[in-house]
Image (tube, rainbow, N blue to C red):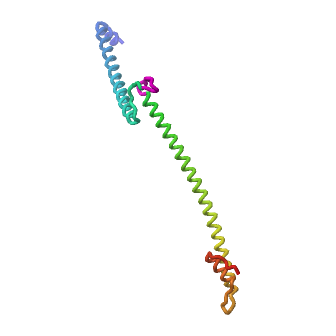
Amino acid sequence: MTVLINLFAKLSGARGTLTLIALAAAAAALYAWGATGRADRDRLATWAGRACAATGTDFAASTIALDGKPRSFARGEQCEARIRDLARSERETVAATARTLAEALADHDRKSAADLASARKLAAAAARTAQQMEQANAKITSDNRVGADWFGALNDLAGLRHPDH
């Protein structure tokens, strides 16, 4: 404890110098912190300028004549409006694309279901005509003569019209 008292006693004469050193250190820290802040600000301003240029607008404050009257825009205001318009347009485009794809998928499903029903109907008809042909073959007499019903079954099997008589 006496060591601390002796240290304070020795430093009491240099209090002004110590205060000045402490203030200089604080000022240097604030300057370094400010330099970092300025660098961040400059990087953001550069990025904003590039982003605005990509949208076709300017980041700087400007005055434009609208309906014959000059209108002032704050720094970044036109760019922000353009970015909002582009984002809205993209959202609408994505939504329209999703709707179109959903409609196309529903149409595809409807057509697939119709194709499946048609294929089942044709398969049943093919099975039925094959059965009729088998029955007509079973009716052939020993002299291998066939009649109109056999030709009708053959025409049905081939997809041709049944004879009228």
Q: In the rendering, at what x and y percent does residue 127 appear?
A: 65, 74
Q: Nearer the viewer, residue 27 or 128?
A: 128
Query: For the view shown, which residue lies furthest in the top direction?
Result: 13
Query: For the view shown, which residue lies furthest in the front direction?
Result: 68
Q: Residue at x 68, y 92 (%)?
A: 142
Q: In the rendered view, does 145 fall on the left or right side of 53?
A: right
Quarter of the image where the N terminus is located: top left
Residue 77 to residue 147: above or below: above
Q: In the rendered view, does 42 fall on the left or right side of 116?
A: left
Q: In the rendering, at what x and y percent does residue 39 appear?
A: 34, 27
Q: Is residue 95 magenta?
A: no
Q: How many marks?
A: 0
Q: In the rendering, at what x and y percent does residue 155 appear?
A: 64, 79
Residue 131 to residue 113: above or below: below
Q: Nearer the viewer, residue 161 or 45?
A: 161
Residue 112 to residue 96: above or below: below
| Quadrant in which residue 16 is drawn | top left
Q: Nearer the viewer, residue 98 or 153?
A: 153
Q: Residue at x 41, y 26 (%)?
A: 64
Quarter of the image where the C terminus is located: bottom right
Q: Is residue 68 magenta?
A: yes
| Quadrant in which residue 20 is drawn | top left
Residue 66 to residue 162: above or below: above
| Quadrant in which residue 56 is drawn | top left
Q: In the rendering, at what x and y percent does residue 129 appear?
A: 66, 76
Q: Which residues are magenta?
A: 65-76
